[in-house]
Image (spheres, helix red, strand yellow):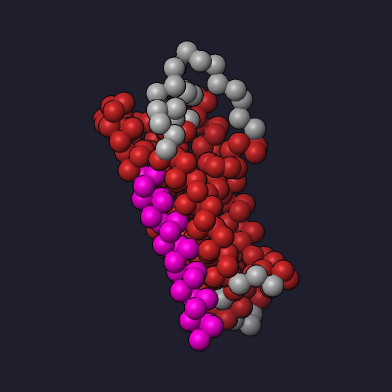
């Protein structure tokens, strides 16, 4: 039971500040502004499911995939940070298209690809989250101990921790409009731009951390 609780807390506490679904909710609302609450609910559910699967794969097989292709975590951080920065930059310069589109315009249906990019990645599960999940997953054998029950408890705790992250994403995105409704249209627009700027800073910081790690290794 101790292994289960420790694994759950490790996964949830490590990923929640980086995934930051509460901070991403205003951007999610801006990107889905044309859609009503009924349409936004299945989108939030798909994003949460996509995020869960992406983090699950990163946690359990991410380190093996990187090892197979000869890719290191600093390279993942640099490449992912560039993706996040590019997305945030585009969001900052999107003008009023995101949050002032006419409500009567009929939005096209969102497919699986639309809910994955950019709503799932890089908005929700970015390179920082993936890097943390891979790092936590690579430490599983040391934390799990030798017994089968211990291994099962650690795996179950990790999966439940990811499920809790997904549930948090769903709730934050599902009720994003209610959360920011007190700001009004203008306030929401400002909050979206501010969140995009913070996302840009995060992307640059991820790139810098990856580059600093590469330099330290090179020395």
Q: Which residues are the magenta region?
A: 195-219
Q: Is residue 60 left or right of residue 204?
A: right
Residue at x 53%, y 63% (from the top left corner): 78
Q: State the residue lying farthest toward the right.
A: 68
Mainly helix, strand or loop, the magenta region?
helix
Q: Is residue 14 visible?
A: no
Residue 113 at what x, y percent from top left? 65, 38
Relative depth, front residue between 115 and 190: 190
Residue 57 at what x, y percent from top left? 64, 59
Q: Is residue 188 visible?
A: yes
Above or below residue 200? Residue 134 is below
Q: Is residue 169 magenta?
A: no
Q: Is residue 62 left or right of residue 131?
A: right
Q: Is residue 214 magenta?
A: yes
Residue 202 at what x, y percent from top left? 41, 56
Residue at x 35%, y 39% (from the top left corner): 193
Above or below residue 125? Residue 155 is below
For residue 43, what is the image quadrant?
Answer: top right
Relative depth, front residue between 150 and 144: 144
Q: How many marks?
A: 0
For residue 25, what is the image quadrant?
Answer: top left
Residue 75 at what x, y percent from top left? 58, 68
Residue at x 36%, y 47% (from the top left corner): 197
Residue at x 43%, y 59% (from the top left corner): 204
Q: Is residue 128 left or right of residue 92?
A: right
For residue 74, what is the image quadrant?
Answer: bottom right
Q: State the residue lying farthest toward the bottom.
A: 219
């Amino acid at each position: 039971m101790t292994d289960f609780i420790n694994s759950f807390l490790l996964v949830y506490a490590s990923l929640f500040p980086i995934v930051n679904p509460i901070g991403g909710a205003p951007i999610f609302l801006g990107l889905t502004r044309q859609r009503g609450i009924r349409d936004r609910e299945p989108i939030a559910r798909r994003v949460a499911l996509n995020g869960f699967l992406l983090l699950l794969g990163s946690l359990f097989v991410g380190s093996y995939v990187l090892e197979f292709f000869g890719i290191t975590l600093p390279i993942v951080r640099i490449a992912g940070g560039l993706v996040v920065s590019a997305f945030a930059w585009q969001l900052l310069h999107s003008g009023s298209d995101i949050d002032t589109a006419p409500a009567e315009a009929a939005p096209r249906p969102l497919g699986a690809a639309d809910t994955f990019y950019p709503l799932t990645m890089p908005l929700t599960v970015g390179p920082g989250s993936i890097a943390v999940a891979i790092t936590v997953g690579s430490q599983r054998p040391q934390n799990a101990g030798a017994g089968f029950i211990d291994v099962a408890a650690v795996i179950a705790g990790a999966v439940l921790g990811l499920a809790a992250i997904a549930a948090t994403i769903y709730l934050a995105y599902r009720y994003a409009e209610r959360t920011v409704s007190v700001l009004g249209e203008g306030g929401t627009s400002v909050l979206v731009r501010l969140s995009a700027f913070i996302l840009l800073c995060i992307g640059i910081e991820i790139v810098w951390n990856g580059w600093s790690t590469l330099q330290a290794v090179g020395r």
